[in-house]
């Protein structure tokens, strides 16, 4: 866990720290629960296919949709906890001031990434809705529906990055 995310958690202000962190934790817990749902779905599908010789036609497609949902809900929790991929070759050797600047730049980079992906997916969703396109396969739903979790995930990532930036800047002024 990164040091700027754990210190003073008990005395953190209600907004934005506790509200944003709570929302991100809740979505991370939902992501974890969905892993169990996928596990059960795979067990049922394998049982039906190989023991009952009655495969579920829609299973693989649904697993793909749920996998996207799991990743999008869990990514912000990984960022909040500091469990994301990081290269600390340089950041471990810099002083406190430069370290804060590096953390602020990292949070701004995540924020920019979330904004770019989120806005492009929003445009894609708007186009799919206006076009009225449906998915091909056994689950025929409008194509914008499985894209919504990506926008949700990017909003969560942006909130987490903003919270990290707020904490970094708040710590710099203290």
Image (cartoon, rainbow, N blue to C red):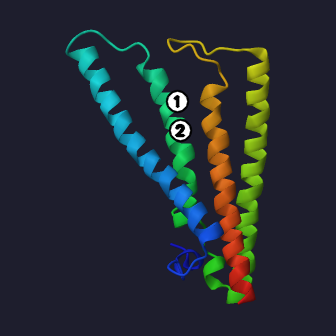
- Alpha carbons under labels 1 and 2: distance apart: 6 Å
- Residue 158, position in %: x, y? 69, 56
Mark 1 crowd level (few <14, some 14–19, many ≥20, 10 Å Cα): some
The residue sitting at the top extreme is 53
* Residue 115 in picture, x, y percent from top left: 77, 49
Looking at the image, residue 52 lies above or below residue 121? above
Specify the quadrant of the image occupied by residue 126. top right
The residue most toward the left is 51
Residues at circles 1 and 2 in contact by the CB criterion of under 8 Å: yes
- Rendered-image quadrant of the C terminus: bottom right
In this rendering, position of residue 15 left or right of residue 111: left
* Up-down relation of residue 19 to residue 91 (above or below): above
Can you say whether 29 is above or below 19 in the image? above
* Residue that carries the numbered disc 1 in the rendered image: 65
Q: Is residue 106 left or right of residue 51?
A: right
Q: Is residue 82 left or right of residue 165?
A: left
Percent x, y for residue 91?
Answer: 65, 78
Q: Secondary structure at mark 1?
A: helix
* Residue 46 vs residue 88, the one in the foreground: 46
The residue indicated by pointer 2 is 69
Q: Nearer the viewer, residue 152 or 43?
A: 152
Quadrant of res 128: top right
Residue depicted at 71% across the width and 64% down the height: 162
Which residue: 65% across, 21% down?
A: 143
Q: Secondary structure at mark 2?
A: helix
Can residue 84 be seen here? The reply is no
């Amino acid at each position: 866990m990164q040091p700027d995310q754990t210190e003073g958690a008990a005395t953190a202000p209600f907004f934005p720290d506790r509200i944003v962190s709570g929302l991100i934790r809740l979505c991370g817990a939902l992501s974890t629960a969905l892993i169990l749902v996928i596990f059960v779905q795979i067990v049922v599908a394998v049982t039906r296919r190989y023991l009952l010789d009655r495969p579920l036609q829609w299973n693989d497609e649904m697993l793909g949709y749920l996998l996207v949902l799991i990743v999008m809900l869990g990514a912000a929790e990984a960022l909040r906890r500091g469990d994301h991929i990081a290269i600390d070759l340089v950041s471990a050797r810099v002083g406190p001031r430069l370290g804060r600047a590096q953390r602020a730049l990292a949070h701004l980079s995540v924020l920019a990434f979330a904004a770019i992906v989120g806005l492009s997916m929003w445009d894609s969703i708007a186009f799919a809705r206006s076009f009225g396109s449906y998915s091909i396969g056994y689950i025929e739903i409008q194509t914008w529906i499985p894209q919504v979790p990506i926008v949700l995930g990017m909003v969560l990532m942006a909130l987490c990055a903003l919270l990290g930036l707020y904490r970094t800047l708040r710590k710099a002024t203290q």
